Amino acid sequence: MKGSGIFYFTFLVFIFSSSKGVPQYDTDSLLRELNTSDQKSTILNLLAEATLEDSLELSMAYATRALTEARIEKNIREEGLALFGKAEVKTYEFKLDSAVYFYEKALDLLKASGDDYNTSYCLNNLGWIHNYYGEHREAIEKYNESLAYLDKEKHQDELPNIYINIGNAYHHMGSYHTAIDYFHKAILIIDKIEDKQALPIAYNGLGLAWKYLGNFDSAILYYDKMLEIDKQTSSVFDKAIDYGNIGALYFDWGQIEQSRKFHQLSLDIYLQEGDKNNISVAYNNLGEVYHKLDKPDSALYFLNKALEIDRKTGMEHNMAMRFNNIGDVYTDLRQYEKALDYYHLALEINRAFDDRFNIALNLKNIAHLKVLTNHYQQAENLYNKSLKMAKELESKSLLAGILESMALFYSETGRFEKAFQYHLQLDVLEDSIFKIKNQQLLADLQTQHHLDQKEKEIAILNSENKRNAEEARQYRNSTIFFGSALLIITSLLILMIYQFRLRKNAYKKLVQKNMQLAETINQKPKSPTNGNVTLVPVQVKNGNGNGNHTKLYDKLKICLETEKPFLLPDLTMKELAQQLQTNSHYLSEVINQRFGTTFTGLINEYRVREACRMLGDEKKDHLTIESIASEAGFNSKSAFNNAFKLITGLTPSYYKKSARAQK
């Protein structure tokens, strides 16, 4: 009903300098030549490239020396390659904002020098970073420009990597058929050059695309091909990715026990490897599996383990998925208020990233909650928005879930003609998804599932027998411990009363502290009301906001305290970056390093402080808390309540009451 939250693994092929290689030299010979060569920048760039895999620190040192020598020699090609080398080190370190800075500077010099080959490399790597940040259209532009600079006859072995990258970008945009075309283009060339390393990556892309188009038969075919190759030639890490993909496919196919087995295999490998992001994904996937198996406690355990990792690593996109999946569990537990809070947290992040697939999923989930709480008109509006997005994305799996939910909704509200129309659309869609060839494979899997269920039933029966024996023993001994239990309960009650008093005093101090913070905002020059806020470029003397964290940090603080752009409810990082005359990557880096938070966290903190000021102002008594939340820039009351509690440690109503009492 709510759609799968299982996360799939995908590959984005990044062309590192090691693939260019320097086969005629080793490090020792390069160092000997450095002492006698007139072109020291060239040798230093080769050294930076040769040491990249072994020592990032040493590679950066050589690239820095190469840059200095190239400028002395006035050799713009080697200067560009030195900047390219620094960018690659930053990419290996996953400092992608810094990598973009060096790649863009390198690109200008490499183009000017006429080095088309390295220009193509630079453009491809920039495309990879755009794709990672979710800027898929920009990524495709870079990839296509990379193809234009590449000599396709001379460097045919590079084409599959770029085609796969373009396919991945189109996949993330929801253009699955276009993605499939590019993956097949890659495979045609791979077959000619017999590239065993790239082939499973292309198969993985095809499997993902066919899965999202609802063709599970084709998807499992390509996943099996991928796993067969990786078992023979690839690392344990690659096999873990394959297991995760196959587990996600079985989940969407409804083969939940098979899905659990593959996701557990994937998690076991990642725990050994220690990769935090992939551990988070594996935890999430197992959480969704246990949710589907109707084990909510296990589901919440794994989902919260994943969320804990994402908060530490700052992966907001993953946090949105975890929030949505936790909301699903609370919906099934009929804890609707909690579920709605988590759905709104997910929606807020997905809107900031313009992730239309997950926005549609969030809207459908919220609509389902509105039905459960008898808000039918709101539910209908949300369903229609979600359906429109799914049709635009051409995602059959998402579309099927929405059509099923809408058919049920209209049936439950007595509008049977509309219910029949949506059921008819769903039947047509499902006929196109499930082919006749799937039936035999599905029957085989069902047989295996029944065998697994029988084994599980036997294990449960044995467990119940043991539990019954243990309960009998505990019953005989229960009277011995009754007095001790009563004493413990009494002690706990006394402790709870004491803690309650401590908490009350702590809340009082929290109110005082937040009042002081709110006053600091009130002392700044006032901005227009929420409805009149406009984003205009911020001018600060001697600061352009590019490449200088301190200047951009100062500009950002001045902007937030004087212009108050956070009052705009739909403010995005891109809009704020434009106002500050910089780009999203630098702005994100400054927020992370100087404020120690994310863009969403920073904006919410300023909104909450503004709300604190209004809640403590008696002149605002005529406003409801929801109105104050709206004036402070929040889209919904639930999002405001969550942010307010997270930042102040208090609820808005408690803060309002206590702040007035202390004046």
Image (tube, rainbow, N blue to C red):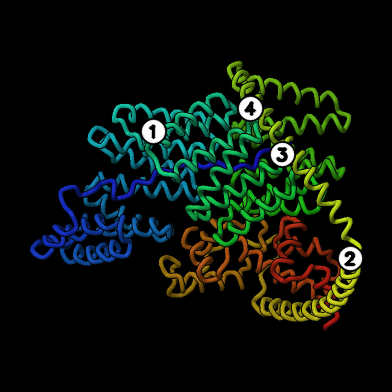
Which of marks 1 and 4 precedes in the sequence? 1
Q: Residue furthest left?
A: 36
Horizontal relation, residue 642 to residue 33: left or right: right
Asked if disc 1 and disc 2 are in contact, CB closer than 8 Å, the reply is: no
* Mark 3 crowdedness (10 Å alpha carbons): few <14, some 14-19, many ≥20: few
Residue wearing tag 3 = 459
Q: Amino acid at mark 3?
A: Ala
Asked if disc 3 and disc 2 are in contact, CB closer than 8 Å, the reply is: no
* Mark 1 crowdedness (10 Å alpha carbons): few <14, some 14-19, many ≥20: many
Label 1, label 2: how far apart the Cα atoms are: 68 Å
Q: Position of residue 603 (x, y in %)?
A: 63, 64
Image quarter hosting the N terminus: top right
Residue wearing tag 4 = 448
Q: Position of residue 292 (x, y in %)?
A: 71, 39
Image quarter hosting the C terminus: bottom right
Residue wearing tag 2 = 480
Element type at marker 1? Answer: helix
Q: Residue visible at 34% across and 34% down?
A: 196
In the displayed structure, would residue 614 be above or below residue 586?
below
Label 3, label 2: how far apart the Cα atoms are: 32 Å
Res 211 → quadrant: top right
Asked if disc 4 and disc 2 are in contact, CB closer than 8 Å, the reply is: no
Which of marks 1 and 3 precedes in the sequence? 1
Label 4, label 2: how far apart the Cα atoms are: 48 Å
Which of marks 2 and 1 precedes in the sequence? 1
Element type at marker 4? Answer: helix
Looking at the rendered image, the disc whose residue lies closer to the viewer, 4 or 2, is: 2
Q: Nearer the viewer, residue 269 or 369?
A: 269
Label 3, label 1: how far apart the Cα atoms are: 42 Å
Q: Nearer the viewer, residue 182 or 570?
A: 182
Which of marks 2 and 4 precedes in the sequence? 4
Residue 199 - label: 1
